[in-house]
Structures are given as structure tokens and as C-alpha cells.
Image (cartoon, rainbow, N blue to C red):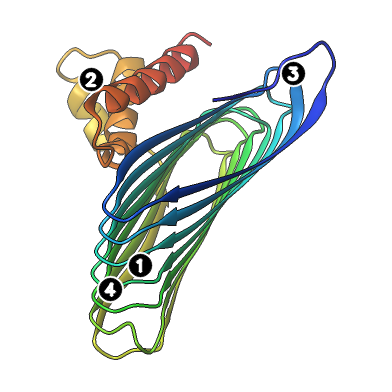
Amino acid sequence: MFAATGEKPASVFTRSLMVVEDGARVMLIESHDAAAARQVNTVLELVVGDKAHVDHVKITAGPDDLIHVSSLMAAIGAQARLNDFAFNIGGGMVRNQTFVRFDGAGTLAGLRGATLLKGKQHVDSTLLVDHKAGGCQSREVFAAVLDDESRGVFQGKIIVRPRAQQTDARMMTRALLLSDHAEADNKPELEIFADDVQCAHGATAGALDEDLKFYLMARGIPEVEAEALLVQAFVGEAIEGIEHAGLRDALMGQVAAWLQARGDR
């Protein structure tokens, strides 16, 4: 956990290196509490050995005047597994940069994220997945819930190198707009230099499904609760990728608290 405390606003710069050796398994929970800081710039370098298994969850929260910039640079060996999840629920200006490189064959990676924004908050998620070795699989699923005048940006690119035959890579980003003044900008990309691959990407943005909301309300559920259920289901698709059940429940609890605060306004 990274905690910035003190009486005066400050800038915080951290850089961490984690080396996971062959066959090892680790769960890393990275939490940033920036109650006193106003600018955070953090970098995590992750080296994953052959047949290793890494679960990484990053949680970002803070006041509306917080500027938070983070970079994850991961190099993955052969027959390894990486699950990465970024959870954003605060901060005025947040940018998460993720760079993942497949150096060995037969590796699986799940890269996911969930963002809940209100007011004039802004979160930028930038992702680059570089398939250098063959027979690897990657899945990218990102969900953003935007209220008031908030803005969410997603920039994702999958690169498949000439030697990365039999790559299976799929990227999806979804945005749910709870206000007419919220904005979502999504730009998924594919750059493929091999011919024996399965790759796909997509992006959606829209409001709550009025038919589903009416269905719930017709069964006696108040409008605020009906909207909360639909938002939880929307975000839950990304959170379900976390293997640790207790951590999944904790994050869904934070989603419920965010929705409760929205309903009390």
C-alpha cells in the first residue's frame, strides 16, 4: 500500500521492481491512498518467469484535485499466466498506462479494469499488448461508468509480431453514461503482422437500458435501486475476472457504496 500523509500537499514519485521467478506464484495488491498528495507518479516493473502465475490488482482513489499517473511494464515468459485488474474510483485526473510484452510461448494474460466517475473526474486508460511469441492468449475487458460531467478515455492496442503465430487476442471496452453531460472516448486498435491468428476488438457506449429498468421497476423495485442493480451487473463482468473471491466481494462493496452515495444526492 502506498500512503501519502502530511499537512501540506506534496508530489510523490515511486518506482518498484518485482521479479517473479520460474514456477512461482504471487498475488500483488497495489493500493494508493493519496489523502495529502496532489500529484502521484508511480511505476511498477514486473518480470514474470516461465510457468509463473501473477495476480495484480491496482486500486486508485483520492480527492477530486488529485493527479495520478501510473505505469505498469510487464515482461512475461513462456507458459506463464498474468491477471491484471485496475480499479479507479477517485481522483481528479488519473492516467493508467499498461505495457505488456509476451516474450515466451503458450502464455495466458487477462487484463481488465473498472472505472466509476462522477463530477468532473477524468480517467485515461492506455494499454499496449505486444505479442512477440506464438501460441499466447490475451483478453482485455474494461468497463467505465460515467456520471455528471466526468470523462473516460480508453486507448488500447494489440500488436502481433510476425513470429507470434497462433495468437488469440481479444479486446473489449464498454462505457455506461449515466448523464447527458458525461463523455466516453474509446479507441481500440489491432496491428497484425502474422497470418495464423484470431484477433478481435470492440467498443460500446450508451445509457442504461430503459427496457431492463422498466422490467425491474414493474416488479416493485424503486428506480434508484433498479439503476444500481444494472450498474453493478455492468461493472461485475470485469470484476468477475479476479480469482480471489474475497477481493471480488470487497470491490463490489466499493461499487455498492459509490452507488449508494449517488442515490443519496
Q: Earlier in the sequence, mark 3 or mark 4?
A: 3
Q: Earlier in the sequence, mark 3 or mark 2?
A: 3
Q: SS of the residue at dot 3?
A: loop
Quadrant (top left/top right/bottom left/bottom right) for the N terminus? top right
Q: Which residue is mark 1?
A: 201
Q: Which mark is residue 105?
A: 4
Residue type for callout 4: Ala
Q: Which residue is mark 3?
A: 36
Q: Nearer the viewer, residue 51 or 201?
A: 51
Residue 35 image offset from top left, x and y in percent: 68, 17
Q: Which mark is residue 217?
A: 2
Residue at left 34%, top 30%?
231
Residue 132 image offset from top left, x and y in percent: 40, 78
Residue type for callout 1: His
Residue 56 image offset from top left, x and y in percent: 40, 41
Q: Which mark is residue 238?
A: none
Q: Is residue 45 left or right of residue 243?
A: right
- Mark 2 crowdedness (10 Å alpha carbons): few <14, some 14-19, many ≥20: some
Between circles 2 and 1, the one closer to the viewer is 1
Q: SS of the residue at dot 4?
A: loop
Q: SS of the residue at dot 2?
A: helix
